[in-house]
Image (cartoon, grey):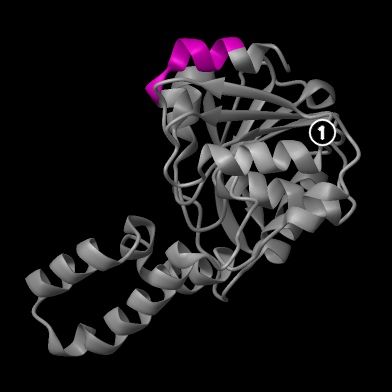
């Protein structure tokens, strides 16, 4: 994979692309929250015509100056594709990247098919979300009064590791985890595949089963002994599942 840069919406974006990339046969990967595309490319980098985009704010790409949500990230994808003269790719999204992909399609973007890996499509205000939001507010209030070591301990015990590591991106993180996209997912009209780790704790397998009910024509592939990063936990099983849909 070749590392390249592009300026979109005034932001320097870092992406990886196959050496002999054909825009007419593109396979586009959108990563999960602050996950560099190198992780996915270490397993699937030999997929022909792969384009893996580090979304703004992670993987070396510049962060937005304002608090972006799914709408802004989806618009960014549209601008990126336009600049690359890319249309109707196979679209792969992991976690938040899948959520962005769904919003991009809801906005009228085109894709041959959609492959979702542990997608964060369901964002209901269950007890886990309530805990994260409540703990994050407490964390922000107490931060000025706590020693650095105590702040780490409090954050590690109460708050999602993603929030703790968000830093200047914490506003974007809080906005993204509130944005449910089940209705947008229901409206999609293209072939869909769901690839899920059986032991996923971030987006549980029950979420995949619910998405399958929403889009009953979708294919569901379950990777055993794998969590949220099923492509890292069980690379051979993941590649076998992925190859069915490419």
Horizontal side of 159 relative to 144 (left or right) equals right
Residue 220 on image: x %, y %: 67, 25
Q: What x and y, as percent, mark residue 173?
A: 49, 65
Q: Look at the picture and state if 144 lies above or below 128.
A: below
In the rendering, at what x and y percent does residue 238 appear?
53, 17
**In-image side of 75 versus 88 (left or right):** left
Q: In terms of image quadrants, where is residue 221?
A: top right
Main SS class of the magenta portion in the image: helix
Identify the residue at image location x=63%, y=38%.
208
| In the foreground, 112 or 237 | 237
Q: Is residue 173 magenta?
A: no
Above or below: residue 75 compared with residue 224: below
Q: Is residue 152 left or right of residue 20?
A: left
Vertical comparison of 95 with 66: above or below: above
Residue 104 in view of the camera: no
Q: Residues within 10 Å of mark 1 (few under 14, many from 20)?
A: few
In the figure, residue 136 lies in which quadrant? bottom left
Q: Which residue is mark 1?
A: 216
Q: Which residue is painted at 61% across and 69% down in the image? A: 68
Which residue occupies 50% across, 70% down? 174
Viewer can see residue 70 = yes
Q: Which of 93 and 136 lies nearest the eye of the viewer? A: 136
Q: Is residue 177 left or right of residue 8?
A: left
**Magenta span of residues:** 233-240
Name the residue nearer the viewer: 99 or 76: 99
Element class at badge 1: loop
């Amino acid at each position: 994979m070749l590392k390249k840069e592009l300026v979109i919406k005034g932001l320097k974006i870092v992406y990886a692309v196959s050496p002999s990339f054909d825009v007419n046969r593109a396979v586009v990967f959108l990563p999960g929250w602050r996950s560099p595309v190198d992780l996915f490319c270490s397993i699937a980098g030999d997929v022909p015509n792969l384009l893996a985009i580090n979304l703004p704010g992670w993987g070396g790409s510049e962060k937005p100056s304002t608090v972006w949500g799914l709408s802004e990230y989806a618009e960014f994808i549209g601008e990126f594709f336009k600049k690359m003269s890319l249309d109707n790719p196979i679209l792969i999204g992991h976690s938040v990247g899948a959520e962005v992909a769904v919003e991009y399609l809801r906005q009228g973007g085109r894709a041959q098919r959609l492959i979702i890996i542990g997608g964060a499509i369901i964002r209901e205000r269950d007890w886990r979300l309530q805990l994260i939001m409540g703990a994050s507010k407490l964390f922000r209030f107490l931060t000025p009064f706590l020693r650095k070591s105590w702040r780490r301990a409090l954050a590690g015990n109460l708050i999602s590791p993603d929030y703790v590591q968000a830093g200047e991106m914490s506003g974007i993180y809080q906005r993204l985890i509130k944005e449910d996209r089940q209705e947008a997912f229901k409206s999609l009209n293209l072939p869909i595949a769901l690839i899920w780790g059986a032991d996923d704790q971030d987006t549980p397998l029950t979420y995949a089963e619910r998405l399958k009910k929403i889009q009953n024509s979708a294919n569901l592939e379950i990777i055993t002994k794998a969590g949220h990063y099923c492509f890292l936990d069980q690379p051979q099983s993941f590649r076998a599942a992925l190859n069915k849909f490419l």
